[in-house]
Image (spheres, rainbow, N blue to C red):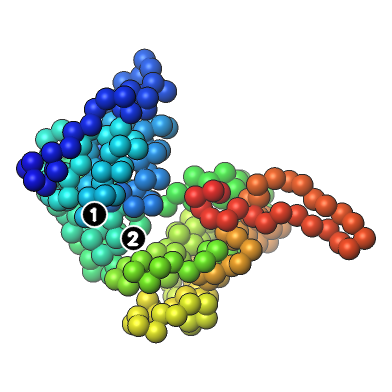
Amino acid sequence: MASRMGGRLFGSLARSRLLSSSVGQSRNLNVGVLGCGRIGQVHLETLCYNVPEANPVMVMDAFESAAKSAVEKYGVERYTLNDEELISSKDVDAVWICTPSQFHADQIKMAASHGKHIFCEKPIATDLKGTLEAVEFAKSKGVKLMTAFQRRFDPNFMRVKQAVVGGEVGKPIFVKTVSRAPAPPPLEYVKGGGGLFKDMAIHDIDICRWMADAEADSVFVTGSMMVSDLSSCEGPEAIDTALTMIKFKNGVTGLIDNCRQAPYGYDQRVEVFGDKGMVASENNFPNTVKKLTADGVETDLPYSFFMTR
């Protein structure tokens, strides 16, 4: 154990600083976080600062420098380089899976086998078979499994959903989403992760299902490589731009616009057109300032990425 843990135990001042924001509140769910990259740190920050009931006690990453950095930054007690060591740890009640997509399904099964509740970054797996197996396995072990469809909790998307549920625009006819990233991800991120549909469009598919309140009956997709060099990739991983049309069982049509690159920033919009009107959300901006001159009207660009949005 000492060799895999690197012998590092941190408990000290960093931990007390994190806990000082929740004085008087009990942290009663011990959490282990798999993956200390960008998204793992997003979840660690949330767990440490914004969820007083959660107590991150252990992190894991294949790269020791990343694991050690997370321990020191967030005041977590210890780290390991081995996922099974974290999952099997007796003081870990729940596991946050923030590793690359191709590892998710196996780690879900491993956590469920140890009776640990699971929060998993999308996707659950990189294929349908693996997804269904992981979900059914978690059910069979009686553990909770949640995946990260955070847009359902975004104030803009929630307000659109509220309008739909409240009948403010009548019966939905079309649901349209736009999801464009500011720049293509590294090639290492794309390879093995399933491609744009599993690491990006998956959020839009969820939002369309949510707004339509129905399951898909048929799907039409067209995609191409337009803004990055993915020539070394195969299948869906070689696509960086796509349009997806979904016909839902209740007659609603969904249209999803995805691209890996939007030079003007992080473009995230949704629209629902109904038989009595339309409701839509626009991008978030750092400010509401407009400059009007003889040359035209100008605003600042929207937020540059989900980290700042």
Q: Residue furthest right?
A: 294
Q: Position of residue 162 (x, y in %)?
A: 58, 46
Would you place residue 284 above or below residue 131 in this image? above
Q: Position of residue 167 (x, y in %)?
A: 63, 50
Taking the image as shown, residue 105 lies to the left or right of residue 175, namely left
User: Which residue is under mark 1?
Assistant: 63
User: Which residue is under mark 2?
Assistant: 123
Asked whether the viewer can see residue 215, the reply is no
Taking the image as shown, residue 179 lies to the left or right of residue 15, namely right
Asked whether the viewer can see residue 156, the reply is yes
Q: Residue at x 48, y 69 (%)?
A: 184
Q: Label 2's element?
A: loop
Q: Which mark is residue 214?
A: none
Which is more N-terminal, label 2 or label 1?
Answer: 1
Q: Position of residue 33 (x, y in %)?
A: 26, 44
Q: Nearer the viewer, mark 1 or mark 2?
A: 1
Q: Position of residue 301 (x, y in %)?
A: 67, 56
Q: Callout 1: few (<14), some (14-19), or many (20+) C-alpha neighbours within 10 Å? A: few
